[in-house]
Image (spheres, grey):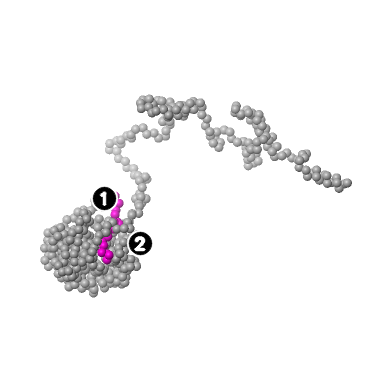
């Protein structure tokens, strides 16, 4: 029996539906009693529309927030707590209702209906003060003019105008030519120079035994001359600086001088013993290079035109270029050599010894170009066996840099608008490449020719290059156009120059 009595006691202890007499007060009972005491203490603070004797014992949300020290903190009921909700009186609501109703009414065309006094009264009613008088900055009319003779010596430290660096944009280089001209019967010979652009915007192209002129301004094409014998052909063309005379080198060892305006041959100068494949002007001095390896200087002002001969190359002179200042003449030959010759001294000819002789190239050197903004810098390019572009300092005679283009270099031109170097290539790429100078990083490639590029020439404004290739086409690439601001500044700096050379040619 004692065992049954013990089991009954255990069951009575484990039953949960019986009240526990000596247990502490439950948590919800403590919260209910605490809320009730707080509600009774703040009954006078309740709004009139709320019931003051409402029981909060059933609310589970505490009305007090426990603090860090264990004490409870009342939620702030005054302005300046978590947020501020303004109160609006009845007058404000009436005015707002009136303004809303006015928006739906038609506009009053009489400007006197709404006066500044009414606006001021509305502002005072709505805000308690006049907004116009409370502004920190108020513009009331135009600023006064400075007194006569006043000078402001303050310097602008900061400006909202963006600097040129921040507004600089990469220019657009079109990947297709701006124009394509047919060049039938073009002689596909690496050693010839068959293209040149004059300062008067005339493009001269040699096609077999004829020379054609294309007016880039109007688009007209003129046949300037044609050789008498069909087996003869044009080997080189070169414009004088003024653009009114054209020198033509032929396969019958002569150099012809033509007046373009009158389409008349002025003279035919014979001094070479082989074809004349390269020409270059230096004022009234015309230099010509032939297959014999000799370079002749011609003074076109006098009857006895041949004034000097330069002997250095053992094979054909295929590249010839005077420096912009006329101090040096650069020549390149099929013997892989580059020579730099001194300028012609008036009345005394010049020395027969070259200033420099460079033999680093491993192929024929036809591509030569002087830097317009650095007259002592010369660029040269080698043929298929070399494929390098080399930059020379003719003052020190050193090679500044060399670049392997992986392709035959047939022509070089400096582009002064963006200080870049343009190269024309034959085997194996048959394209035109624009390089940044002096880093020689590639800027763009111009592809389109289906044969090796033979010659490159530049327009008078240096914005367009013309290329001629073995595919019997002349392509014009507008790759160096200046923005309008720079273009206008450059046009103001350019001064027209007159020449008196036409008065003394005979």
The reply to whether the magenta stretch includes residue 194 is: no
- Say which residue appears at 68% left-offset and 37% top-offset: 31
Residue 488 bears which disc, if any? 1
Q: Report whether residue 108 is seen.
A: yes
Question: Badge 2: how crowded within 10 Å, few (<14), some, or many (20+)?
Answer: few
Q: Determine the image quadrant of residue 473.
A: bottom left
Q: Position of residue 375 (x, y in %)?
A: 26, 62
Query: How many other residues sit within 10 Å of disc 1, few (<14), some (14-19) or many (≥20)?
Result: few
Q: Secondary structure at mark 1?
A: helix
Looking at marks 1 and 2 on the same chain, the residue that comes earlier in the sequence is marked by 2
Q: In the rendered view, would you say 461 is above or below 232?
A: above
- The boundaries of the magenta stretch are 469-488
Q: Could you give the CA–CA distance between mark 1 and mark 2, rounded to whole angstroms?
A: 29 Å
Left or right for 459, reference 91: left
Q: Residue furthest right?
A: 1
Q: Give the residue at x 56% y 36%.
A: 81
Residue 166 rendering spot, x and y as whole percentages: 37, 50
Q: Nearer the viewer, residue 341 or 315?
A: 315
| Front one among 300 and 384 | 384
SS state under label 2: strand
Residue sitting nearer the eye, 206 or 272: 206
- Contact, CB < 8 Å: mark 1 with mark 2? no
Q: Which residue is mark 2?
A: 441
Answer yes or no: is residue 326 visible: no
Judge whether residue 478 is colored magenta: yes
């Amino acid at each position: 029996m004692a065992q049954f009595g013990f089991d009954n006691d255990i069951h009575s202890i484990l039953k949960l539906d019986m009240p526990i007499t000596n247990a502490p007060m439950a948590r919800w009972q403590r919260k209910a009693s605490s809320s009730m005491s707080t509600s009774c203490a703040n009954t006078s603070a309740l709004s009139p529309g709320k019931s003051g004797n409402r029981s909060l014992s059933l609310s589970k949300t505490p009305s007090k927030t426990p603090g860090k020290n264990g004490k409870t903190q009342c939620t702030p009921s005054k302005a300046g707590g978590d947020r501020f909700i303004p109160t609006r009186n009845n007058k404000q609501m009436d005015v707002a209702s009136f303004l809303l109703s006015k928006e739906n009414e038609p506009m009053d065309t009489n400007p006197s209906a709404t006066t500044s006094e009414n606006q001021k009264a509305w502002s005072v009613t709505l805000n308690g003060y006049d907004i116009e008088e409370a502004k920190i900055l108020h513009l009331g009319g135009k600023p006064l003019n400075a007194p006569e003779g006043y000078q402001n010596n303050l310097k602008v430290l900061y400006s909202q105008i963006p600097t040129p660096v921040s507004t600089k944009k990469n220019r657009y280089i079109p990947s297709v030519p701006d124009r394509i001209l047919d060049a039938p019967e073009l002689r596909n010979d690496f050693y010839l120079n068959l293209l040149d652009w004059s300062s008067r915007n005339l493009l001269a192209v040699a096609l077999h035994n004829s020379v054609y002129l294309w007016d880039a301004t109007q688009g007209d094409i003129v046949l300037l001359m044609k050789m008498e014998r069909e087996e003869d052909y044009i080997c080189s063309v070169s414009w004088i600086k003024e653009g009114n005379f054209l020198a033509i080198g032929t396969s019958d060892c002569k150099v012809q001088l033509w007046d373009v305006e009158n389409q008349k041959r002025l003279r035919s100068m014979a001094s070479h013993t082989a074809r004349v494949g390269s020409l270059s002007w230096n004022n009234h001095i015309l230099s010509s290079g032939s297959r014999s390896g000799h370079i002749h200087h011609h003074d076109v002002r006098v009857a006895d035109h041949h004034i000097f001969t330069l002997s250095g190359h053992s094979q054909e002179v295929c590249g010839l270029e005077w420096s912009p200042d006329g101090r040096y003449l650069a020549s390149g030959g099929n013997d892989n050599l580059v020579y730099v010759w001194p300028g012609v001294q008036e009345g005394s000819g010049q020395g027969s010894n070259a200033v420099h002789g460079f033999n680093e190239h491993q192929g024929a050197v036809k591509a030569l170009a002087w830097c317009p903004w650095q007259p002592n810098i010369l660029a040269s390019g080698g043929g298929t066996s070399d494929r390098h572009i080399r930059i020379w300092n003719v003052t020190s005679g050193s090679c500044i840099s060399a670049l392997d283009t992986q392709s035959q270099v047939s022509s070089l031109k400096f582009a002064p608008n963006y200080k870049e170097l343009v190269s024309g290539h034959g085997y194996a790429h048959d394209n035109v490449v624009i390089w940044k100078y002096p880093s020689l990083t590639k800027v763009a490639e111009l592809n389109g020719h289906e044969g090796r590029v033979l010659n490159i020439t530049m327009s008078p404004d240096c914005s367009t290059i013309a290329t001629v290739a073995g595919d019997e086409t002349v392509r014009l690439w507008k790759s160096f156009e200046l923005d309008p601001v720079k273009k206008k500044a450059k046009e103001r700096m350019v001064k027209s120059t007159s020449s008196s050379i036409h008065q003394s040619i005979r």
